[in-house]
């Protein structure tokens, strides 16, 4: 992150919505290390206090417990801030299919509340979490920002609406924003519990408990798995962006490599045998494909590299090493 080394964060006040979540808490951690003053807005519906408890007594950290569906809370949280990093959302394709109303309320109404409050507060840079799900039924690989298909789930649709709102806010109000389309983010602190947990923590938990992991489909579906530190880097680059050619764009945040579910499981097993040699014999159970899933996902990161100077420092293998080590230590504690 050489481009960021000379940037002075110490005079910045930054609001991170969803700051008690997996991605938000990692971003807050880095911003505090850089000397910024950070305000966290979270309603703890999916975020965890344990993710931010290390910041509790940091004088540069402030917690506002509230919901982005409440416009007055959004107005309060944005006042006096320089930048906003909007990470709050209700994730998960299956959850959105089961409960589209709540997904809409959080991801669309909540987004409109926070971007409008940010406009009123004259926020300089507004960065928001977009999603690779926006590519929908497009079968083109790699995924290029300008070429999307039709959404396959309520969740995907909400993320597309976010991008459209951001575009309208630029045209109507000259309000600047940047959208970051995340591809399958993983890393330490990702929730291992719940029906909608991501695949890597689910696989790790099953293996460490000597249970056969469940794979939806035949295991051939592939994803562009992206370590959390790469996502933090992209957010910092977007928050500090000033050039007109960089602002008001969406960028893929990924590693530009794809790995099948079977390959991913084997990578995890070969790391976990260092802690428990019994995992190597565990074979997966194959279940039905999930509704709304796309078979393959692979990002082009050329645009992010050329305009944002995004350069992922962590490969899948390096990220898995750090992630497995964290889960082993924390599941045993």
Image (tube, grey):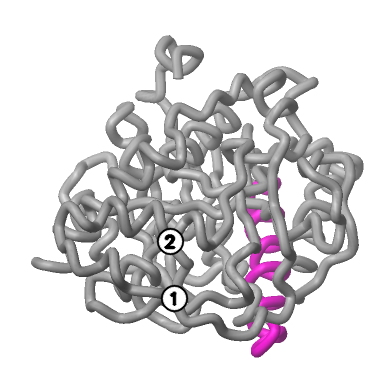
Judge from the rendering whether residue 315 lies leftward or rightward of residue 84; answer left or right: left
Judge from the rendering whether residue 267 lies leftward or rightward of residue 122; answer left or right: left
Label 2, label 1: how far apart the Cα atoms are: 9 Å
Q: Is residue 147 above or below residue 188?
A: above
**Which region shows up in magenta?**
97-120
Q: Position of residue 144 (x, y in %)?
A: 81, 39
Q: Residue at x 62, y 67 (%)?
A: 71
Reading the image, the residue beneath label 2 is 265
Reading the image, the residue beneath label 1 is 284
Quadrant for the N terminus, please: top left
Q: Is residue 114 magenta?
A: yes
Label of residue 69 in the image: none
Q: Is residue 159 magenta?
A: no
Q: Position of residue 103 (x, y in %)?
A: 66, 77
Do callouts 2 and 1 mark residues in contact (Cβ within 8 Å)?
Answer: yes
Q: How many marks?
A: 2
Label 1 crowding class (10 Å Cα cut-off): few <14, some 14-19, many 20+?
A: some
Q: Residue at x 78, y 48 (%)?
A: 166
Q: Name the one closer to the observer, 256 or 182.
A: 256
Q: Callout 2: helix, strand or loop? A: helix
Judge from the rendering whether residue 46 lies leftward or rightward of residue 160; answer left or right: left
Q: Is residue 122 above or below residue 164?
A: above
Q: Name the one closer to the observer, 85 or 321.
A: 321
Quadrant for the C terminus, please: bottom left
As drawn, the residue found furthest toward the left would be 333
Label 2 crowding class (10 Å Cα cut-off): few <14, some 14-19, many 20+?
A: many
Q: Callout 1: helix, strand or loop? A: loop
Q: Residue at x 20, y 69 (%)?
A: 278
Q: Name the one closer to the observer, 186 or 89.
A: 186
Can residue 45 be seen here?
Answer: no
Kindly indicate the quadrant of the structure image that contains residue 100.
bottom right
């Amino acid at each position: 992150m050489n481009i960021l080394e000379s940037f002075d964060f110490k005079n910045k006040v930054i609001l991170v919505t969803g700051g008690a979540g997996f991605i938000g808490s990692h971003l807050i951690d880095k911003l505090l290390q850089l000397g910024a003053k950070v305000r966290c807005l979270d309603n703890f519906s999916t975020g965890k206090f344990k993710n931010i408890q290390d910041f509790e007594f940091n004088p540069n950290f402030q917690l506002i417990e509230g919901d982005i569906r409440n416009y007055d809370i959004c107005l309060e949280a944005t006042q006096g801030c320089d930048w906003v990093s909007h990470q709050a959302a209700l994730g998960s394709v299956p959850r959105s299919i089961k409960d589209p109303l709540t997904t809409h309320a959080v991801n669309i109404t909540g987004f409109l509340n926070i971007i409008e409050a940010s406009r009123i507060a004259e926020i300089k840079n507004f960065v928001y979490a977009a999603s690779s799900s926006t590519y929908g039924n497009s079968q083109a690989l790699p995924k290029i920002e300008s070429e999307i298909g039709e959404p396959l789930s309520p969740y995907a649709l909400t993320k597309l609406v976010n991008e459209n709102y951001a575009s309208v806010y630029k045209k109507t109000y000259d309000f600047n924003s940047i959208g970051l389309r995340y591809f399958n983010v993983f890393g330490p602190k990702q929730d291992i519990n719940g029906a909608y947990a991501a695949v890597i923590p689910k696989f790790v938990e099953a293996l460490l408990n000597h249970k056969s992991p469940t794979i939806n489909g035949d295991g051939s579906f592939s994803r562009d798995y992206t370590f959390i530190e790469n996502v933090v880097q992209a957010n910092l680059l977007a928050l500090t962006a000033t050039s007109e050619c960089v602002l008001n764009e969406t960028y893929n945040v990924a590693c530009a490599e794809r790995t099948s579910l079977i390959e991913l499981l084997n990578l995890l097993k070969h790391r976990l045998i260092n802690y428990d040699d019994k995992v190597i014999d565990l074979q997966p159970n194959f279940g039905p494909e999930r509704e709304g899933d796309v078979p393959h996902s692979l990002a082009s990161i050329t645009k992010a590299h050329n305009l944002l100077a995004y350069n992922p420092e962590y490969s899948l293998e390096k990220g898995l090493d750090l992630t497995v080590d964290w889960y082993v230590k924390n599941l045993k504690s």
